[in-house]
């Protein structure tokens, strides 16, 4: 059975801190890994990672994939209260388009 | 519209009643997904439609759940004889073709409360 495990489950930090969120996976025929940010109901897309070792960056957020060790990390530097959200990791297989999601990491950034 | 549209945004229903949730995908998106998210939990895959192919129904939790999609347009998720454990946000998403590198875009969800 395909598995996506995120850690930590929840995290509380202060503004300005740097955080690292983890996502490990066990899937057959892996194709890509996606990160989403969920603040209210609808997750919004952050990154899609397909190749190992290539960092994707968007402002204070960055992510990298390790296909040998089967994990990805999402880094947020200089955190702000607006970064408070659930961060979801999802994995896509090469066959079909179904995404398997992890349970998410709930991040709270305190002023 | 520009995004994935879902209705109703909130629905309170009595246990045992049937409910229908609607999803309008982004125009031109061939793939449509339904996910369920219970309070404090992750997204649980329900069903996936891709063009005219047979849908992937592997995530539907019981035969009380069904979904339809006509062509590449609107989809309806139906829950019959609702139970309290069906209370959740039901999220719809659509994409053009994931394997071509596109991502999926979520609607705002339909929050279902079964009392």
Image (tube, coloured by chain):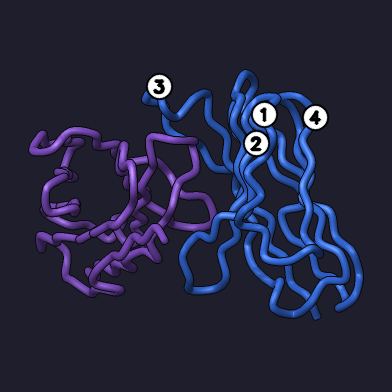
Chain colours: A purple, B blue
Q: What subunit carries mark 3? A: B
Compare residues B35 and B109 and report the one nearer the observer.
B35
* Quadrant placement of the C terminus of chain B: bottom right
Residue where numbered disc 1 is placed:
B53
On whether disc 3 and disc 4 are found on a single subunit, the reply is yes
Nearer-N-terminus badge (2/4): 2
Disc 1 and disc 2 in contact, CB within 8 angstroms: yes
In percent of width and height, residue A93 lies at 38, 41
Disc 4 and disc 1 on one polypeptide chain: yes
Indicate which disc residue B100 carries.
3
Mark sitting on residue A52: none
**Labels 2 and 4 share a subunit:** yes
Q: Tell me, yes or no, whether dots 1 and 3 are on the same chain.
A: yes
Q: In the figure, B53 relative to B66: above or below? A: above
The image's mark for residue B49 is 2
Q: Earlier in the sequence, mark 2 or mark 3?
A: 2
Q: Nearer the viewer, residue A2 or B44?
A: A2
In 3D space, how far apart are the residues under numbered discs 1 and 3 (Cα atoms)?
Answer: 17 Å
């Amino acid at each position: 059975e395909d598995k996506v495990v995120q850690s930590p489950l929840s995290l509380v930090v202060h503004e300005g801190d740097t955080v690292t969120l983890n996502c490990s996976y066990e899937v057959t025929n892996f194709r890509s890994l996606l990160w989403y940010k969920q603040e209210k109901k609808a997750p919004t897309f952050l990154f899609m990672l397909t190749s190992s070792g290539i960092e994707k960056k968007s402002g204070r957020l960055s992510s990298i994939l390790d296909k040998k060790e089967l994990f990805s990390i999402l880094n947020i530097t200089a955190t702000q209260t607006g970064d408070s959200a659930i961060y979801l990791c999802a994995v896509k297989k090469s066959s079909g388009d179904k995404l398997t999601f992890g349970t998410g990491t709930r991040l709270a950034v305190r002023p | 519209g520009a995004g994935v549209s879902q209705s109703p945004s909130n629905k309170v229903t009595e246990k045992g009643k049937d409910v229908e949730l609607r999803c309008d995908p982004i125009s031109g998106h061939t793939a449509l997904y339904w996910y369920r998210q219970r309070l404090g939990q992750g997204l649980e895959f329900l069903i996936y439609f891709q063009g005219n192919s047979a849908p992937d129904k592997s995530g539907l939790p019981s035969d009380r759940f069904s979904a339809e999609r006509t062509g590449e347009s609107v989809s309806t998720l139906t829950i019959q004889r609702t139970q309290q454990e069906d209370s959740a946000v039901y999220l719809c998403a659509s994409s053009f073709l994931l394997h071509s590198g596109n991502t999926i875009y979520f609607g705002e969800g339909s929050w279902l409360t079964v009392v």
